[in-house]
């Protein structure tokens, strides 16, 4: 397999200088972590956190290294990683730009050697996702994009599915699902074709590329979907909350 990722980005001519420089820096920061991510797939040590989620040494290392690289260029920006959040309370944003990172999205998969996992980095401006990067380990490529920029997978433009027919829908969904939501989903679960990749970022990547028709999440955190939200919007997908 060719393990070399493209350095291409979408057309960024519409980005102002402050956004443009951050997109290029985020692009490099993610690619700089890919070799380390690949080398430790299925091999890294892990432990269980108090909230019942798994964390690996790779989560913690990428979180520190990736943000350290960005903080040199953008010390006034806000930074939030799944591995740096210790409070359930909302974290107020102080700057115009904020970086939201899941260093290993799909940690359970990554730790045991299931390839649906990756690095997810979202860039927010005034609280809204404006650009995202998802390194998809299983496909060994970089998906990126945002509103006004479109979305590309590697060097290929991608678009969300548009012709949706209810009985033919293929949706991504993650479990467990809250009991109170099951009745509302009863009909859909009998009609839709359901996939559960175990990674919110990979699920949204598949929506952005049109491989899946949609994604339904009930317990997603900002780091799960910040990058995917921006990319999906760039690919023409719509969100409902």
Image (cartoon, rainbow, N blue to C red):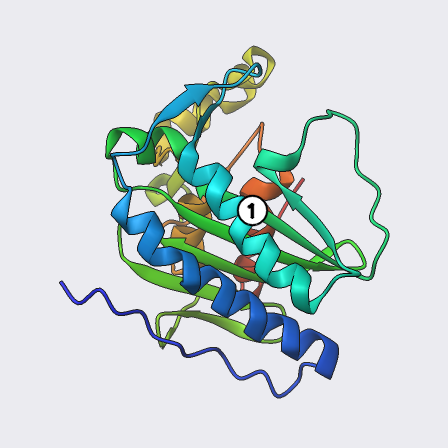
**In which image quadrant can residue 170 be found?**
top left
* Residue 146 visible, this orientation: yes
Q: Which residue is mark 1?
A: 64
Q: Which residue sits furthest bottom?
A: 13
**In which image quadrant can residue 146 be found?**
bottom right
The C terminus lies in which quarter of the figure? top right
The N terminus lies in which quarter of the figure? bottom left
Q: Nearer the viewer, residue 190 or 62?
A: 62
User: Residue 117 at x, y = what percent?
Assistant: 36, 42
Q: Quick check: 58 above or below 86?
A: below
* Residue under the point 31% across and 41% down: 116
User: Residue 4 at x, y = what percent?
Assistant: 26, 69
User: Residue 230 at x, y = what percent?
Assistant: 59, 59
* Residue under the point 67% across and 69% down: 73
Decide: few, some or many residues near mark 1? Use Cα within 10 Å; few <14, some 14-19, many ≥20: some
* Residue 130 visible, this orientation: no
- Secondary structure under badge 1? helix
- Side (left or right) of 22 relative to 189: right
* Residue under the point 34% across and 27% down: 45
Q: Nearer the viewer, residue 160 or 90?
A: 90
Q: Which residue sits furthest top?
A: 179
Q: Quick check: 206 above or below 10?
A: above
* Residue under the point 29% across and 42% down: 40
**In which image quadrant can residue 97 be found?**
bottom right
Tally of marks: 1
Q: Nearer the viewer, residue 158 or 153?
A: 153
User: Residue 236 at x, y = what percent?
Assistant: 53, 64
Q: Which residue sits furthest left?
A: 1
Q: Nearer the viewer, residue 1 or 188?
A: 1
């Amino acid at each position: 397999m060719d393990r070399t990722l493209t350095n291409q980005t979408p057309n960024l001519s519409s980005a102002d200088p402050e956004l443009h420089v951050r997109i290029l820096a985020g692009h490099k920061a993610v690619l700089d972590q890919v070799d380390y991510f690949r080398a430790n797939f299925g091999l890294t040590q892990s432990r269980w956190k108090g909230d019942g989620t798994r964390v690996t040494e790779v989560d913690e290392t990428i979180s520190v290294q990736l943000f350290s690289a960005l903080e040199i260029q953008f010390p006034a920006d806000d930074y939030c990683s799944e591995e740096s959040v210790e409070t359930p309370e909302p974290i107020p944003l102080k700057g115009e730009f904020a970086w939201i990172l899941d260093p290993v999205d799909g940690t359970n998969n990554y730790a045991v050697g299931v390839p649906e996992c990756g690095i997810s980095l979202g860039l927010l401006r005034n609280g809204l996702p404006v650009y995202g990067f998802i390194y998809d380990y299983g496909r060994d490529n970089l998906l990126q994009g945002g509103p006004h920029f479109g979305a590309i997978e590697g060097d290929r433009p991608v678009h969300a599915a548009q012709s949706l027919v209810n009985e033919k829908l293929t949706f991504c969904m993650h479990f467990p699902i809250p009991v109170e939501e099951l009745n509302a989903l009863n009909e859909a679960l009998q009609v839709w074709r359901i996939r559960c990749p175990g990674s919110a970022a990979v699920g949204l990547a598949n929506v952005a590329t049109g491989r899946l028709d949609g994604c339904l999440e009930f317990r997603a955190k900002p780091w799960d979907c910040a990058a995917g939200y921006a990319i999906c919007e760039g690919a023409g997908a719509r969100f409902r909350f």
